[in-house]
Image: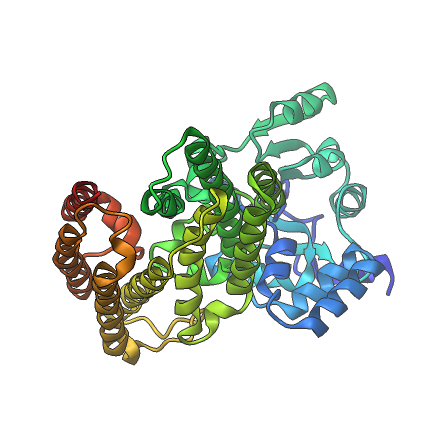
């Protein structure tokens, strides 16, 4: 295949000699869409098994163009759900109103490029990569100059790879807030115009890292409280363990979000997550994940090898959950409960103290209940909105009643475990008035029952623990239980 035939199918509908205006050429990744289809393709197909990953590696060794071609064929992306730039769509509509031809020119593979062009329906032609040519930088500039001539087109791009193309364009539109990029273009003598793009503020990153979920890591302090270990060293160790788990959890949240992009975009609320809506590029998340992991294990190394081992087990189980276990019926619930309980084990390893078997049993039952409430809320939302069964979970809408029943049963088993603990000889050595601990049972029964009923009434958010942190009654219950434990001590 010659270089000309590589692109001839992409401009057959146009005659630039008779076109009634300067063509507007639009880049795709990072410009028209606020994401990158190479990374999207990889994560959309990341669950396809070892043979797929072997073929991906073979394609990567042959070059970027073969890699893009293979991943484009292996992945399924819903182009209608991609985060398109409203500002660039408005520029395109303005050009079309002036009878100017508009072209898509992208380094993405032709399967994606033609799919997006067909979805939007307003492009007069498409230039894209194939399985031999990676249409980027000088290669793209050459193709566009051959098609339209020097200064014969306007170009919308977003990165340093577009510099050579902008230099050949009549007007350079920058879909990027980079001041250094703008200065380079202005020094080259190009006519430069900026396209407003959303800034990647600290607030957006806080949302992506799910800092509000760090409250879950307060479970690390539970062994310190139950063992009455209140020395300065114990408090510092537990606090550093909290930081390590928070960093590790954030890396897992980022990974989960980039894997679940397509599913999140189909969800009424998750579609607003920073990666799904394009507020943060997928590549930035890919870079942030190992940085967070290294920081987390750096903190763990300062505590103890035992704590580092527990954190590693947590991270491995989180990876297994993100890649496969969350799509297995009930297994996902058990894994979620185990991840919560691992935080308790980590808190014990940080001190170090031996975690009570009563505490571990109670943790498994109560966190199983809360995980089931979370699934109940997700299924109830789909039922209410008449959505189909979830594609990234092995649950059906008809499972809603049994999931609610299991949540209630597991919660009351947790209360039973606590009652047995209060009756056990182990309590006498830790509390002066252990009989007061019986008062915790009715408070727990009230709180857990109320959570299940509120979930049934569609009052809860998709995460019961996050809801509890903002719920007045839940905070009162927590205050009562803390006061009871303190009086019993």
Question: For this rendering, which residue is in front, 261 or 134?
Answer: 261
Across and down, in percent, residue 142 comes to 81, 44
Which residue: 31% across, 61% down? Answer: 362
In this rendering, is residue 399 above or below 291?
Answer: below
- Residue at point 45% right, 63% down? 263
Q: Is residue 59 visible?
A: yes
Report the residue at 68% width, 64% height from top. Answer: 71
Q: Position of residue 274 (x, y in %)?
A: 45, 45
In the rendered image, the vertical position of residue 402 relative to residue 342, given as above or below: below
Q: Locate the C terminus by quadrant.
A: top left
Q: Is residue 90 visible?
A: no
Identify which residue, 341 or 38, lies in the foreground. Answer: 341
Q: Is residue 4 left or right of residue 254?
A: right
Dividing the picture into quadrants, the one containing residue 215 is top left
The N terminus: image quadrant: bottom right
Give the left or right position of residue 102, taking residue 218 as reference. Answer: right
Q: Nearer the viewer, residue 151 or 216?
A: 216
């Amino acid at each position: 295949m010659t270089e000309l035939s590589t692109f001839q199918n992409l401009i057959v509908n146009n005659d630039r000699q008779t076109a009634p205006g300067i063509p507007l050429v639009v880049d795709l990744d990072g410009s028209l869409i606020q994401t990158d289809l190479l990374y999207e393709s990889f994560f959309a197909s990341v669950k396809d098994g070892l043979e797929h990953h072997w073929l991906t590696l073979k394609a990567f060794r042959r070059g970027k163009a073969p890699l893009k071609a293979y991943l484009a064929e292996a992945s399924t992306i819903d182009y209608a759900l991609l985060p398109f730039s409203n500002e660039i769509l408005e520029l395109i509509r303005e050009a079309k109103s002036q009878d100017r031809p508009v072209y898509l020119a992208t380094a993405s593979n032709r399967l994606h490029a033609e799919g997006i062009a067909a979805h939007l329906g307003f492009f007069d032609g498409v230039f894209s990569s194939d399985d031999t040519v990676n249409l980027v930088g000088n290669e793209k500039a050459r193709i566009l100059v051959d098609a339209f001539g020097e200064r014969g087109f306007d170009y919308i791009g977003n990165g340093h790879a577009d510099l050579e193309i902008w230099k050949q364009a009549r007007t350079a539109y920058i879909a990027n807030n980079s001041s250094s990029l703008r200065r380079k273009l202005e020094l080259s003598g190009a006519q430069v115009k900026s396209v407003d793009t959303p800034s990647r503020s600290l607030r957006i990153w806080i949302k992506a890292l799910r800092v509000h979920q760090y409250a879950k890591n307060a479970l690390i302090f539970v062994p310190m409280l139950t063992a009455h270990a209140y020395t300065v060293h114990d408090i510092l160790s537990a606090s550093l363990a909290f930081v390590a788990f928070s960093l590790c959890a954030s890396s897992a949240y980022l990974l989960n979000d980039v894997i679940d992009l397509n599913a999140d975009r189909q969800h009424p609320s998750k579609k607003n997550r920073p990666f799904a809506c394009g507020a943060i590029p997928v590549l930035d998340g890919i870079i942030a994940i190992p940085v967070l992991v290294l920081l987390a294990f750096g903190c763990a190394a300062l505590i103890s090898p035992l704590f580092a081992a527990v954190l590693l087990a947590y991270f491995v189980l989180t990876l297994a959950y993100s890649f496969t276990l969350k799509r297995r019926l009930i297994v996902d619930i058990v894994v979620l409960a185990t991840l919560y309980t691992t935080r308790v084990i980590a808190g014990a390893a940080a001190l170090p103290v031996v975690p009570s078997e009563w505490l571990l049993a109670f943790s498994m039952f109560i966190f199983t209940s809360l995980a089931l409430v979370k699934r109940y809320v997700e299924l109830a939302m789909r039922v209410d909105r008449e959505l189909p069964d979830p594609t990234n979970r092995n649950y059906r809408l008809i499972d809603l009643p049994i999931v609610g029943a299991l949540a209630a049963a597991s919660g009351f088993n947790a209360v039973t475990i606590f009652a047995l603990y209060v009756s056990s000889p182990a309590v006498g050595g830790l509390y002066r008035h252990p009989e007061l601990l019986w008062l915790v049972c009715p408070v727990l029964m009230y709180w857990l029952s109320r959570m299940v009923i509120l979930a049934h009434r569609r009052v809860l958010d998709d995460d019961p623990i996050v809801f509890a942190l903002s719920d007045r009654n839940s905070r009162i219950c927590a205050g009562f239980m803390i006061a009871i434990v303190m009086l019993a001590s």
